[in-house]
Amino acid sequence: MRWLANLIFFKILGWELENRFDPAIKKCVIIVAPHTSSYDFLIGILVRKIMGIQINFVGKKELFDSPFGWYFRAVGGSPIDRAGKKKKVDAIARIFEEKEIFRLAMSPEGTRKKTEKWKTGFYYLAKKADVPIIRVSFDYETKKVKISEPYWPSGDLEKDFTKILNYYDGVVGKIPENF
């Protein structure tokens, strides 16, 4: 199926892929931005298939009970209970401990709508699980997916966030006004 993903991504959709994931990195937090459209999921699935590596995500547990729960598990999803005041960072850190390979992709905005600031959960999760952050951008203007080198959070949130956010300067989402 990799040939089909290549055909769709490169030839039909006309996208480019800059850099690749190092397959030796078995655990990491991958932040994908801007996340302005459901279409981003399709781009992510194609890129993952092209690279031939496992990339995971977490979703609300109800998603995995639905008629499509089997599909979400098959494409690397893990259910998480988001109800109440549960400690989501701790719950996801436990998934990192339980799995041999877990490359968690997530949206730092936490939504497809416009936000004034990013959520910090991905940062604290990377610190707690002792894994690097890999930044990925989906630039719809240039039709380019860019993948950064691993970034290890220092513990200085302000300094690290400045470096992380700078990676996304000039990147345009599918719905630009939402980023």
Image (spheres, grey):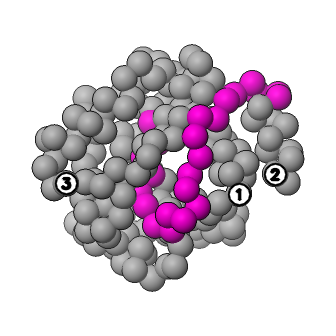
**Above or below for 94 versus 68:** below
Q: Residue 154 carries which label?
A: 3
Write down the quadrant of residue 115 in the picture: top left
Instruction: Locate residue 58, reporting x and y percent.
Output: 48, 62
The residue carrying pointer 3 sits among few (fewer than 14), some (14 to 19) or many (20 or more) residues within 10 Å by Cα, namely: few
Q: Which residue lies furthest to the bottom in this view?
A: 98
Reading the image, the residue beneath label 2 is: 2
**Above or below for 33 versus 26:** above
Name the secondary structure under disc 1.
loop
Residue 141 seen anywhere in this rendered image of the structure: yes
Instruction: Give left or right: position of 89 versus 9.
Output: left
Is 2 magenta? The answer is no
Discs 1, 2 touching: Cβ within 8 Å? yes
Disc 1 marks a residue whose amino acid type is Gly
Instruction: Locate residue 85, reporting x and y percent.
Output: 22, 66
Disc 3 marks a residue whose amino acid type is Ser
Instruction: Give left or right: position of 142 versus 115.
Output: right
Write down the quadrant of residue 179 in the picture: top left
- The residue depicted at 25 percent of the width and 29 percent of the height is 116
Say which of 108 and 146 sits in front: 146
Q: Residue 52 carries which label?
A: 1
Q: What stretch is highlighted in magenta?
A: 11-33
Residue 41 seen anywhere in this rendered image of the structure: no
- The residue depicted at 41 percent of the width and 57 percent of the height is 29
**Above or below for 104 versus 96:** above
Marks 1 and 2 sit apart, C-alpha to C-alpha, by 8 Å
Say which of 149 and 37 sits in front: 149
